[in-house]
Structure formats: structure tokens, C-alpha cells
């Protein structure tokens, strides 16, 4: 069972809609990530939060807006998306620094933009 | 920035045959290395990792990988393929930066197991 929970699993939205993806972890990790993944491609990093502060933004369009309300939660707010934004959106968490620090992934939210 | 190369975007093996998935990385410092597996419509699951210590690392589902510093490689192997091993496999390197952990993924290898 995954320890990173993502909701919803599937989302269909129009280009004028506003929706949000949610992610939750209870492993005490202080780094949380959003990745975008197209079919048969590796995950592409979008955002990283360390200690609830945005530490990396990989030049993601402003129609994607991340939010980290507390150390367990990570949201991705979506507005005015384009069809090419359709993808699997993966949330992950990890320790900050340290010798271990692997990424723990959720099962993803499959987004379709019509 | 690190780079990770996975040779062979598609690998096919017969059931019961050896699985070998190749991964090379670029790093001037000892890396932290990972192999992840992804089944259709699922997230990535950690197979195994190398941080320090023993260079032969054993993971889940009978997979193992060997860290070879001189070859900058971290190839994944399994002695006998099973149908359930069919999936996408990603090699990754972790780099510790001031902004936190940064992970670099290879382009992935799709493994097909032929009955």
C-alpha cells in the first residue's frame, strides 16, 4: 500500500475549469514534490517544497499553482489548462538531505483536459 | 546537473531468462542511486537503492543491482524473469543541493516478458 495518497485518481476538466489535485503523506517527510508524466516517459519535475516552502519551480506555467498548507499536505491548483496538459500527475515525498532520502510516490492523478 | 542514461528503451526477454537493464550516470561525487518500477496506471515503486556500503544491492521481487564506480554504472538484474515483471523501469540519481534533494531520472526501459 502506498503511503502517499493522491486524490482524485481521475479528473476530466474543460479548459475554463478550476480544479485541484491533493496529496497527503504521514511519514514525517519535509520535502514534497509534484511531477508530470506523459505516457512512456520519465517523470518531469514541476515543483519541490522543503519545510513547506517552495524551493524549486521548474519554469512551470502559471496555470499550475502549488500550495503546501502544512507538512503533510500538498495541493496543485489547476486553472485554464490546455489539452497538452493531459498527463499523469504524481506526488512524491522524501526526507530532506540525509543518507536515505528516496522518493515515495503516490499512485497519481490521471488528468484529461478537454 | 546529473544525467542518467538507460541503454535500450525496450527490452524483451523470455520467461525464466535473465533480465539485464542498463543504467549509467554522470557524477563526480559518490551518488545515491535508485531503481524504480512502474506498472500501468500506477505510481513509481522503489525496487532498490544504493547509498553507501556494499556495492551489490538486493531489492524486492528478486531484483538486484551492482554499483560500479569505475564504470559509472548501476545495472539492474534478475536471474529469472516472471510475467509479472513486465513494466517500465526507471533508474534515478539523487543529488543533494542547497534547495533540497534533486532527483534525475533516466528515460526508462520498458520490459516485455514473453511466455
Image (tube, coloured by chain):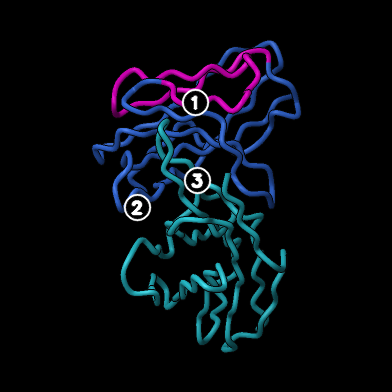
Chain colours: A blue, B cyan
Q: Which residue is mark 1?
A: A21
The picture places residue A20, in percent across and down from the top left corner, at 51, 20
> At 29% from the left edge and 37% from the top edge, which residue is drawn?
A29
Local SS, label 2: loop
Q: Using the image, name the chain to which the residue with label 3 belongs.
A: B
Q: Using the image, name the chain to which the residue with label 2 belongs.
A: A
Q: Which mark is residue A95?
A: none
> At 49% from the left edge and 74% from the top edge, which residue is drawn?
B68
Q: Does residue A63 belong to the magenta stretch? A: yes
The picture places residue A34, in percent across and down from the top left corner, at 50, 33
- Image quadrant of residue A80? top right
Pair 2/3: label in front: 3
For mark 2, does the 10 Å Cα neighbourhood hold few (<14), some (14 to 19), or many (20 or more) residues?
A: few
Work out whether disc 2 and disc 1 sit on a shared chain. yes
- Image quadrant of residue B38? bottom right
Q: In the rendered view, would you say B40 is above or below B73?
A: above
Magenta residues, as a range? A54-80
Q: Using the image, name the chain to which the residue with label 1 belongs.
A: A
Q: Measure the C-alpha gap from mark 2 to mark 1.
A: 20 Å
Q: Which residue is mark 3?
A: B103
Query: Do tag 2 and tag 3 residues touch (Cβ < 8 Å)?
Result: no
The picture places residue B60, in percent across and down from the top left corner, at 39, 70
Residue A47 vs residue A55, the one in the foreground: A55
Q: Which mark is residue A1?
A: 2
For mark 3, does the 10 Å Cα neighbourhood hold few (<14), some (14 to 19), or many (20 or more) residues?
A: many
Q: Does residue B39 belong to the magenta stretch? A: no
Local SS, label 1: strand
Per the picture, the main secondary structure of the magenta-coloured stretch is strand
> At 60% from the left edge and 88% from the top edge, which residue is drawn?
B17
Amino acid at each position: 500500500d502506498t503511503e502517499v495518497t493522491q486524490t482524485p485518481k481521475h479528473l476530466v476538466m474543460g479548459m475554463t475549469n478550476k480544479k485541484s489535485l491533493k496529496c497527503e503523506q504521514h511519514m514525517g517527510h519535509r520535502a514534497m514534490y509534484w511531477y508530470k508524466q506523459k505516457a512512456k516517459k520519465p517523470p518531469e519535475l514541476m515543483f519541490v517544497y522543503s519545510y513547506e516552502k517552495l524551493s524549486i519551480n521548474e519554469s512551470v506555467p502559471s496555470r499550475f499553482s502549488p500550495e503546501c498548507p502544512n507538512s503533510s499536505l500538498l495541493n496543485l491548483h489547476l486553472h485554464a489548462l490546455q489539452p497538452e496538459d493531459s498527463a499523469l500527475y504524481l506526488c512524491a515525498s522524501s526526507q530532506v538531505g540525509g543518507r536515505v532520502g528516496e522518493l515515495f510516490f503516490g499512485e497519481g492523478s490521471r488528468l484529461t483536459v478537454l | 546537473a546529473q544525467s542518467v542514461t538507460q541503454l535500450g528503451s525496450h527490452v524483451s526477454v523470455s520467461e525464466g531468462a535473465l533480465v539485464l537493464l542498463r543504467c549509467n550516470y554522470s557524477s563526480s561525487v559518490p551518488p545515491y542511486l535508485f531503481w524504480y518500477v512502474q506498472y500501468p496506471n500506477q505510481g513509481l515503486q522503489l525496487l532498490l537503492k544504493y547509498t553507501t556500503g556494499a556495492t551489490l544491492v538486493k531489492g524486492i521481487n528478486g531484483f538486484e543491482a551492482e554499483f560500479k564506480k569505475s564504470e559509472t554504472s548501476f545495472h539492474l538484474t534478475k536471474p529469472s524473469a516472471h510475467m509479472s515483471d513486465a513494466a517500465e523501469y526507471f533508474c534515478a540519481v539523487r543529488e543533494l543541493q542547497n534547495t533540497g534533494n534533486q532527483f534525475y531520472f533516466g528515460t526508462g526501459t520498458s520490459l516485455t516478458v514473453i511466455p
